Amino acid sequence: MKKSLYKCKNCDSPIPPELALEIKFNFCPLCGKLYPQTIEFLENYFRIIQLTKELKPSSELLLRSELNVSVREAFIKFETIVRKKSGLKNLVGKNLMAKAFSFKMDSDKKVIEEPKIKVNDLSSISKKNEQEGIMYLAMGLMHGIRNIYMHSEGTRKLFYSIQIITFVDLLLKQILGWESIATCSE
């Protein structure tokens, strides 16, 4: 039997040579922890996208290899921020997003009921479309993806967790604006 050249820095276990040579892992196939190089890449990624300060706890959980918990934390933070900004304290999930971002127009396409959370000034059709698009994205996030993680195990896949946190980050930037972006020194 060939001796492995690769060892996990977390559990110090040798990685079977057939696994080490065939597949490039981001995490140890034995203990499940992210490799230091993967952590470094993710830290750089979060700096590049300027992850919102509000998602720092989610990113820290992800870097500790707590993938599902990191995603749940992002959902909880997002829902809490929307609830607080909208003043809709008794709503959750899809219904909260619908009420928080929806607006009404008259037959002349003039806004007659403002959204609780505005992502822009709604002064043009494009801006109204943007507001409505953010509403639908937030509703879909809560109704589809959030429910997978809040009501079941979810999926313990690194790429999926990163994509969800990035998606929540995009929506938070729309809601909170540039002041939410963490600086590189933080």
Image: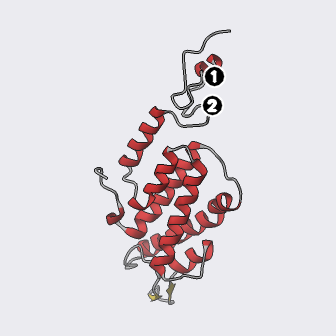
Residue denoted by label 2: 29
Mark 1 belongs to which amino acid?
Answer: Leu
Q: Image quadrant for the N terminus?
A: top right
Residue 105 image offset from top left, x and y in percent: 50, 86
- Rendered view: 151 above or below 102: above
Kindly indicate the quadrant of the structure image that contains residue 128. Answer: bottom left
The earlier-in-sequence mark between 1 and 2 is: 1
For the point 36% across and 64% down, the residue is 180
- Rendered view: 157 above or below 24: below
For the point 55% across and 65% down, the residue is 76
Kindly indicate the quadrant of the structure image that contains residue 16. Answer: top right
Nearer to me, 3 or 85: 3
- Rendered view: 83 above or below 141: below
For the point 61% across and 21% down, the residue is 22
Residue 77 image offset from top left, x and y in percent: 50, 65
Q: Determine the CA span between mark 1 and mark 2.
A: 9 Å
Nearer to me, 104 or 155: 155
For the point 45% across and 77% down, the residue is 85
Is residue 65 at all visible to an observer of this figure?
yes
Residue 19: mark:
1
Give SS at disc 2.
loop
Residue 7: mark:
none
Q: Cβ–Cβ below 8 Å for labels 1 and 2?
A: yes
